[in-house]
Structure formats: structure tokens, C-alpha cells
Image (cartoon, rainbow, N blue to C red):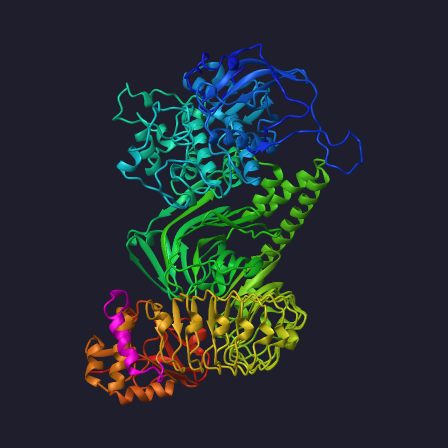
Amino acid sequence: MNNEKDDGASDQQDDQDQNPTLLNPTLLVNITSGEVDSMPSLSGSSSSSLHRTGSLGSNSGEEEILCVEGGQKYKMGPVVAHGGMGVVREAFDLNCKRSVAIKILPGNRPVQPEEHERFIEEAQITSQLEHPNIVPVHEVGFDTNHNVFYSMKYVQGVTLTGVLMGIRKGDPAIIEEYPLSRLLNVFQKVCDAIAFAHSRNVVHCDLKPDNIMICDFGEVLVMDWGLARHVGANYSGFSTGKTASPDETPSLSAEEVFAQDTIAAPTDSLGAVTRTTTGRIMGTPGFMAPERIWTQTTVDVRSDLYSLGATLYSILTLRAPIAGKDMRMVLQRILNGDIRPPISFNEADASAGVSDPARQIALLHCPEAKIPEPLSEITMKALSTSPTDRYASVKEMQQEVEAYQNGLIWHLVVDDDFTSDKFLENWEVIGGRYSIKDGELRLNGGEPQILLLKRDLPGDIRIEYECHQESAYLNDVSCFMSSVRSSNRKEIPSSGYEFKYGAYDNSLNLLMRSDRRIWSESASPIARGQLYHVLAERIGSRLRLVVNNQEIFRVTDRDPLSGPDRTAVGTVGWIADTRYRRIRVYCLGTPWKSDMLDMAERQTQKGHYEISMSLFQEVMDSFPDAQRLTRARRGYETARRREALTKSLPEWKARLEAAWPGRTFQLRMDNDGLTLEISKSDIDDLSPIVGLPLTTLYCAHNRISSLEPLRGMPLGALNCTGNPISSLEPLRCMPLSTLLCECCRIESLEPLRGMPLTLLVAGGNRISSLDPIRGMPLTLLAIWDNRIDDLSPIRGMPLTALYCNGNRISTLEPLTNMPLVTLNCSGNLISSIEPLRGMPLTVLHCGENKIASIEPLQGMHLVILSFPDNQINTLQPLKGMSPASLSCGRNLLTGVVPFAAKPPDDFGFDCDTIPTRELEWLYEKWSHDFRFAFHAKNVQVLLALRRNDLAQLRSLAAEFKGHRYLFIPKFLRWDEAKAYCEKLGGHLVIITGEEENVFISSIFKSGCWAWMGLVTRENGHEWITGEPVSYLNFVDKLQESKLGPKIFSGRWARDDVDGASNSFIVEWDS
């Protein structure tokens, strides 16, 4: 069949009388040779001449132009395709003695200049796309009449439209030749062509079944690149005069849409509608993405993803995704995303009569005449109205289709939208607080805060969820899978794979395996209020994270987790106010077809080690190639080692139970070593674990004084926080990459010298020197509240987060050019922050220092900025910055002008140097704007304090069960705040129950950090009023155990800087 279609191939015929030359089958096209005057160039401009400047083979150094001799080159044949954008004719190349196709502009009407330019651009773009699935262009030129043309391969075959229409009509030969399996192979080749074009920054812009040729010998070619554009160019769409971002979902009023010129659109067309030309839509309605309707919309590869989805829709349903009785209806449906899911055509519709034509199309090409659900889901995702909801790339869509072809089908297990508390039937909340409002699940205040699926899900998992964060503090939009359930429930996520996005105060993206980092990048991706669609999945050893259609990582773990107990799945965060809208969890079914090596590795993943060893042995015995043999041997050894470890577990557990009777612990296998969790178990001796092949140990908050039993162990991760340990000497030469040893009695880091640490948390100790960690590849370092006076040893480290508050540091110079995203250097002796200039900081705490200028912060995009109790006299360098939280009280400020028009949500600025008239002006300004009601009230409090108006202060207080509570936005040290409250006739707030705690939290819409009346001493907690301490609400055990006055932030904590200045809450008992 000779049927090379072009431009939608309408039934309209060219007017032969106006241009008989175009249809003369014996016409010889003469190609101009030698010197030609005023020949139009292929750029659409004019060229003075084409001439020879040297002979072939000469080395004259001059530019050589080869001129063609002889005038006759092509013998023209009949028209084989035509449409609104051009005419294609069969021709015979007289020089090469072969049949070709020649495309020329239509001759039945005047050709507009922009059509001429577009035609040349089409030829140039197509000729540059050399790919097996793109029709090759042979030549671009002009005939002697200066008519532009280009020649290309003459294709013999049938369009995809022809195939689908044949199936639709029930042609048995076509149905037999083109089952769905072959059509999916055709679709994959189309995807290959489009992906290649995208790699060259070219977008097809008119992909549809009619532009896909299936040749006589199985070749698949994407035709007609007449509307192709380079990425970043503008579409020529409706001339509405409007512009829109490709990320927007456009909507036109009836007047705007229907005022446009329209054409007929046959109902249920498969894409053979003639596309419009100048002055109308450039594309094929029904296969054109919604954003294409808008003029001046930037060309984006995602519009081709929509067209690929429409093409796949046609393959599945034998229908176009959108149809209508006229163009107006089609356009409205495009804009509204009014598309029926393919799978719905499988369902019997009792309301549909037998005369309904939509019910008369048998899907004879599909398995059991049913459209597969996974392909329907893939199609609908590609057809999303919003470009951001589609696939990020053609490759990603191809992988989904290929997974189906290989029998790797994702089965939906859980789908919750949080419209009610019914989600608790499937999920358990661990840590922090939760609430349901407006179809969102709010989690906040937990360290960590976990949403754990109650159902056990082993094997390969995919989790998808939508969420956003609304607090000033941004951190950790993460999830986990293949984790082990344990009594220490907060450690469940870290026992498996953690897909961490914006972790560690929004400074890193990470992939963790059993608390070991296997991939990371410095990043600060979370923005307040931004909606994130997160997809994380595991398929065997392959792990992938995609956020808002952008692939964050794709990692192959050479040592993947395995075992039958790895069934825990969920999301995890840290303190930040995170709102979840929807969450879906999928399991990957057993493949329909699978390589024996894949089967063996899947059995290892499930913990069926004997079966996997048998399969690996069978592969090794079958004379495999070198690569498969290596893979099989490695798999066999892994399974053998893990089987041996698994068999030894009961013996080791019995030994530990005998040594620690009544203690709660968990011992599990993690790859080629054991992990022991025995935190908060009141043990004082680690001797029972001598000889265990431990690679990870969690023993925080016990009474352990010596790490000597760990000497020589191959530990990669250790958490011994909150123990009376004074020496790290037993850890010397260990391969540790993660070490947490906060709030111990450690004086020296010398035993850590030379370790490959990437994370070190050693705050609250007695360390005076960082020299032992010089040269380490640390990305996070926490050394708060020590005795450090020199940061020189960390110069040049790839740190993204540094917590060095509460030390004796006088200069930040060693931090110059460091990629820090988060820095806390409060409570030191720092006088200049010049070394921070140009850093990618989003969080900075530098209060309680001697800083006189914040000018180095100019131009930064800080989200949280805190510098109280310094010597700063102006906020002017922060002009243009929009932090969510700004704390700058107890400085030398005289005003807050840069933030007077729009103050940060959390704004603490009181300074004695600010004139009363300035506060009165701020109150007048903010009190008339409901958005700033809390700010206006704070100014009222400050003014009442200056007037010593106790009556007004009490009237501004919130009342609960006979007690009054008032936030005082002054910055005082704890003992000063305590005395100040007593002066006001009250006391620092005490909280004796959950209900009271919730009420006080409700006062603060954007969170708070304020002194309360609780202090922790060696002998325990004390309320300043002498009230018995019967209720506690600490973030974690570490915050509870730290000595000193406590902070209220919803949950309770301690400020790690001695002598810090903070706001506070006063309470009147009556």
C-alpha cells in the first residue's frame, strides 16, 4: 500500500486548474546550477549568488561550495498526500535512480510569507533529526521558479490510523496482524523518535496516528514535522491576545473560545482531521494539549507527552480521546480535561442502548477484548490537563509501558484522600500531632512524625502522595519502604530505605539504606505553600524518587535490603507543619515473564535464600556469558551469607535475652551484618554484644559508660546519644559513616581521625578541638554547646548544615565558599558574618553574638533568619527579602521599614531603641489589615508595656479555665523573663495538662519559640510555682534530659545557647 499521509490528509482536493504543474506526473523539476542571482536562501532571506570558489581537492584555504551541474533531477509523479500545510508527491530521482517523496507548498491558494518560512524550518528541523524512526530528508532546495521543496524517503506502508480503523471495522486480517502487543511495540518506536527529537530540543507539536507510518517491513516512522518547534519558542495558537504559562491549566470563557473561527471536527475522529493553517489553531484538535490553545505559550516537551497519551488512547480504544459535533465542543472538552478513561469502555453501560455507536466498537485487538487497567492509567496520566501532572519525559512514560509489556504491573493497595478520620483504618500516626481539615491530614511537631501503613507490604513498592508545608520551618518531605516493624517505633523508617527530600533543615536530598547514606545531593527544594507530588518506588535493587515530575534520583543499590520482615511502608517528616492531600501505595505483581536471574534476585529480596541459591546455581550451570556468570556468583554468595546470618539470629537473641532479662530490644539482619536497637532500655553494659557481627547499633539514652565492647566491630552507624560516655577510643579505625553521640561527656574526637564520616552529631559534650575531623567528607556537623574556638579544621568540607551554636568561636572565616544551606552559630563571639556572603543559605541563626552589620546577607533567599541580641542598627540590607520567620529583637534598631508593608508571618523585632511613635505608626498600619492582626496585637502589647498599662495587658490575654495567657514579644533571658512576669503580677506559663497545652498552641498561628516556667535540674523537672510536674510534652528524650530552662513551641524543648534571649508567655492565675 502506498499511502504516505501528510498534514491530516483531508478529503479536500487541490484545485488543478490553478496550478496544473503540481499534478503533472511527467514534469521534470530543474535544479539550478552554476551562478544564480537572487536565489532565496533556506533561512528565508535572499542570497546574491551561489558560486565555486575552488576546485575539489584544492588546499587553497578558501571556502568551497560545490555547485551541481545539470538541470534535471526529479521526475515528478502523482500526489500521495496533501493537506492545509503542504502537498507530497511521488517522484523519481534521476541522479540516484530511486523513488523519493517531494514535499512542496500547496498551489491552490496564495502562500503566506509565514507559511514559506515555516516550510523551510520544517525541512531544516526534519533533516537534522537523523533517527531510524524519523523519515529521512535527502535534499532541500528551490526549483528554477524559486519554489521551495524538499525530498525525502518514499515510504510504503500504512498509517497507524489505517490500522486502527481496520481493527475498528473488524477486518480479521488486520486484527490478526496487529494485536495490542504489536501496537505497543509500534508505540514504543514512536516514543523513541519523539524522545530523540526532545534530546535535540525539538517538539513535534502535531503527533497523531495519521502521522505515524508502519512500513511494509515493520519499520515505524514519525512523519510530518511541519509544526515542529524548538523548545522555548512560542506556539502559534489561538489569537486571543492572552498568554499563559505551560504549567497553567487554561480556561476560556464561551465568548473567548467561540468567537474564534472554527472548523468541522468529525465525531470520534482518529486524528485524520485537516489541521488548520494561518489564523487558526496550529495542530489537530483532539490530539493537541490544552496549553497549545493559547497564543505565545512557550513550547514545552510536555505537549508531546499529551499527544503521545492521545495516541496511546487511540490504540487502546480505537477512538480519539476527545471528539465532538463541532470544534467548539472539542475545544471546551480539551480545556476541561473532559476525557473518558479507556478502561471505562470495558464496562457494560445499562443506560446505553444498542444503537449507541460507542458501544458497537469491539476491542478485538486487546487481550480478552478488554483494555488493561495499567495502560489506561498510563494514558490518563499523559493526558493530564496540567503539564506538571504528566510524565516528566518520554523515557519515563516508555518505562511504564515497558513494565506492562514485561508483566510488571503495579497493583493499587491503598488510596486515601483524608476527607475523614477513616484513614486511621489503614494508617497509624507516630510522633507529633495530627488533625483532619478541608480534606488534608496535618502532621506537625514530631521528631520524627510518621504515617505508618498498618498493612504488611513485602517486595517491590511504589508510594505516591501530595503534600505541602505551611510553617516557617521547612524540613523533610520524605517516605520509607522495606522497613522492619519494631517496638522502638520511631526507628522504623531508618531500618529500611528512606527517600528523603529537603532533609536536615531543607539542606539535602538523600537516599538512605538502614541509616546508611547511599546517595545524596546538596539541595534546598522545599518552598512554603508549594504543592509537591512525590513518587518513590523500589523494584528489586532499583530505587527512584520523582517530585513534581522531576526525577531526583535513580539509583541501583548493589547491596539491596532483603528479608521476609521488611514490610513497613509510610511517610516521615520532622517537626515541620506538613499537610497531606492524598496518598496511594502500590505493590508490584509477579512478572508474567522473567529472566531466571531476576527470579533469583527477587527470592533473595523476599528472604527465600535457599530457593535463590538454587536458581543462581542453575544459571551458573547453564554456560552463561561472563556478565551473567559474575552476576549469578555475586548473587549466590550474597544469599549464602544472608542465610547464614539469618540462621544465627535465634542463638544471638537468646544470648541477649539472658544477659538483659526484661529489656526490650530488636536484633535483625541488615544486608551482611546485624542491627541492634536497644535504646531507652536502662542498660549499663554492652558486654553481651561482644562477638556479634554488628554493622549498626542504636543504644541511646541508657546508662552506658564505656564503648569498650565495640572495639573491632565493623560498625557503619552508631547512635550512643545520652549516655555517660567519656571516651570514643574503642571506635578507632571503625568504618563509621554516621555517628550520633550528643549529650555524653566526650572531651576528644581524636579516635575518629581518618574515618569516612558523612554525618557527625556531637553536641552537648566537652570537645575543644575539631582537628581530628579535618578532611572528612561531612555534609552535616552538629557540635553545639561544646568548648570549640576554632573552625579551621572544617575548611573546605562539603557541609550543607552546620550547628556550632553555644561555643567560643570568634570568626566564621573558615566557612568561606562552603555550600551551607543551614547554619546555627548563635551564642558565640562572632563580630562579622562577611564569610557568609554569597552562600545558598535558607536558614540562619546567629543571635547572641557581637555582629554589627547584616549587609553580607543582601540578596540571599533566607526563609528563617534569627539574630537577636547583637549590635545591628538597620534592617535595610534585607530589603527585598521575604523570610517566613525573622527574629531581630534586642538590637539597636530604630525601625522595621523594609518589613512594614508586609511583615514576616513570625516577626519578633522589639528593641528599646525603637521610638514609641514608630510602634504607634506600625499599629496603625497593621491593625487595618486582617492578615497582620497577630502582629498588630503584639505591637499593642509592647505599647501597653511601655505605658505600664496592666489593665490593657490583661484585656489582651487569652482566657482558659480561669487563667489568662499573654505572649510577650520582648527578648529577655530566662531569669529576666521570670522577673518581668512577676513584675506584671503573674509568672512564666506553667502547663499541667494536654488540654491546656493545645489551647496555648492555638494562640500561635505560625508557631512560636518562647520561655516557659519549667526548668530541669540534676534532680528532675521543676515548675517555678512549685506545682507538681505531672504532665510532660517534650519533643524527645534528648530535649527532656537537657539541663536548664525550657522552651514552649507547641512541644517542649531546650534552647541550646546558655543565656539566650527569647520572647515569653506570662500567665495570670485569676
Q: Is residue 141 depicted above or below 624 in this figure?
A: above
Location of residue 843 in the rendering, given as x and y in whole percent from the top left corner: 46, 68
The dominant secondary structure in magenta is helix
Q: Is residue 1051 left or right of residue 375?
A: left
Residue pictured at 32% horizontal, 41% vertical = 251
Q: Residue 370 appears in which quarter of the rendering?
A: top left
The residue at 39%/21% (across/down) is 362
Locate residue 218, reporting x and y percent.
58, 22
Q: Quadrant of residue 1066?
A: bottom left
Magenta range is 911-932
Where is residue 655? Give x, y as percent: 57, 66
Q: State the residue in front, 611 or 1006.
A: 1006
Quarter containing the C terminus: bottom left
**Relative to 49, residue 76 above or below:** above
Residue depicted at x 49% and y 65% = 504
> Is residue 921 magenta-colored?
yes
Q: Is 634 located above or below residue 710 in the figure?
A: above
* Residue 967 visible in the displayed image: no
Residue at image location 65% in from the left, 68% down from the top: 755
Is 839 on the left-hand or right-hand side of 623? left
Residue 553 in view, yes or no: yes
Give the total number of marks visible in the rendering.
0
Query: Which of these two is toward me, 357 or 991?
Result: 357
| Residue toward you, 557 or 510 | 510
Query: Residue 970's x, y, as percent?
Result: 33, 81
Q: Quadrant of residue 868?
A: bottom left
Is 250 colored magenta in this rendering? Answer: no
- The correct choice, above or below, for 358 with respect to 291 in the image is above
